[in-house]
Amino acid sequence: MEERILKMSSVILAGMITAALVVLSQFSVVNRKEAKREQMSDLQMLAFYTEQAEKKEDITFRQQLRLELPPDMTEDEVIIKNDYVKQLVTIQIPGVEKDYFSKHPLLGRSDSIDDLYMEKGVIEITLDAVYEVKSAVEEGYLYVDFLTPQQVYDKVIVIDAGHGGGAPGAIKQGIMEKDINLAIVLQLKELLEQCDRNIGVYYTRTEDINPTFEHRAQLGGKAKANLYISVHSNSTTDGQMSEYNGTEVMYDETKDKEGRSSKHLAQICLEEVTELTGSKNNGLTHGNGIYIIRNNEVPAALIETGFMTNQTELNKLVSSEYQELMAQGIYNAIMRALDEGY
Ligand SMILES: [Zn+2]
C-alpha cells in the first residue's frame, strides 16, 4: 500500500516537474528579450537607452547625465552625496521604485564613470577619479555634470588625519593619537576655509572613521593634487615615556629629490611648523616604509607633530591652543609650498 502511494506520488511529481519545465521553457522563449535585458549591467543599460534616445529624440548626450524626475519633485528633494575618498556619488530620489529607472531611464554619457548601480530610490555612481558634482533641475529633468577639481579650483590639496575609528594609533594615558591628529586637521580646515585663495581641499577624514590605506594613499593621485600632507603624532619605539621630543617630517627618500619634490615639501613643513610652534626640529625622516607615503602619486609629507611619549609635549598636543598653533604652522607650510609653485 505504502509502495503504491509512493509510486503514485512519484508519477505526480514527475508530471509536475515536466509541466514546470515546459512552462519555464516557454516563459524563457517569450521573455528571452526581457531576460537578456535583465543580464545587462546598469552601466550597459545606460549606454543602451542613451543610444536609443539619441536616435529617437535627435539629441546628443555628452559628458552629462539626465534623469526624468517624478512629476512635482523639486530640486531640494533630490539628495546628491559625493564621497571623494571612495569616489562614490549617490543620487537619492525618494519614493522611487527600481522599475522607475526602466520606465524613465537614466540617460547620458561620461568617460568618468567606472560603474553604475541602481536600486529603489538610489543611483550609485563609481567614478574613476575625484570629481566635483554639478547638478541642476530644468523642466522636470535632473542634469548631473562631473567636473575635475582643476576645472573648479586653482590649486588642489589633500589633508590626511592619521588613524581613526578602530585604529587609534598610539595611546598614552588614555589619550589616543587619532583624536590629536583629527583635532589639528579640523583646526587646519577652519583656517583653509577662511583662506581667500581658490584652493580645493580634500580630506581623507573629518570625523572618527578609518578609511583604508588604499583610499588614503590614492586620494592625492585621484584628485591630481598639488600636494598631500598627513598629520600624525609620534611615540618612541619602545613606547616608554622619555625626554625625547620634537617634530620630524617623513617623505619618500626613493623618489625625486629635486625641484617640487616630496623632500622639499617635507622641508617646508618642518621649517614652518617648528618655527611657529617652537617645537624642536628633529629633521627629515625616510618614509618609504610607510604605505601612504610609498604609494602616493603626488608630493607628500607626513608630519609627526610631536611626541606623545614626552609628558610636556603630550600636555601641549592635547591643548586646543597648541593644536591651533600646529594647524597654523601647517597652514603656513601649505601657503609657502603653493607660492613656490607646487
Ligand atoms: Zn601615527
Image (spheres, grey):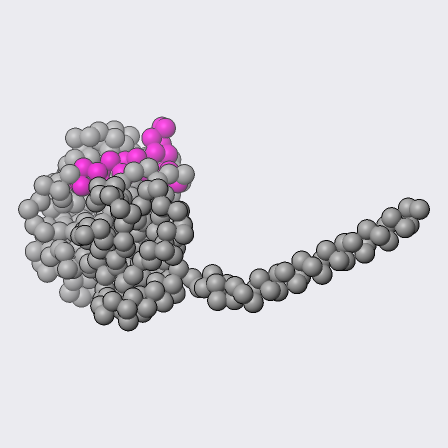
Residue 68, compared with residue 93, is above or below; it is below
Q: Residue at x 20, y 35 (%)?
A: 323
Magenta residues, start to end: 167-189
Residue 230, percent from left and from top: 26, 48
| Left or right: 198, with 160 as reference point | left
Q: Residue at x 21, y 38 (%)?
A: 186
Of 48 and 247, the residue lying toward us: 48
Q: Is residue 240 visible?
A: yes
Q: Quadrant of the C terminus?
A: bottom left
- The residue depicted at 32 percent of the width and 42 percent of the height is 94
Above or below residue 184? Residue 149 is below
Q: Quadrant of residue 328?
A: top left
Indicate whether residue 130 is drawn in magenta.
no
Image coords of residue 132 (percent x, y): 21, 54
Q: Is residue 181 found inside the magenta-colored segment of the image?
A: yes
Front residue of 330 and 81: 81
Q: Position of residue 125 (x, y in %)?
A: 33, 55
Whether residue 303 is situated above or below residue 244 in the rendered picture: below
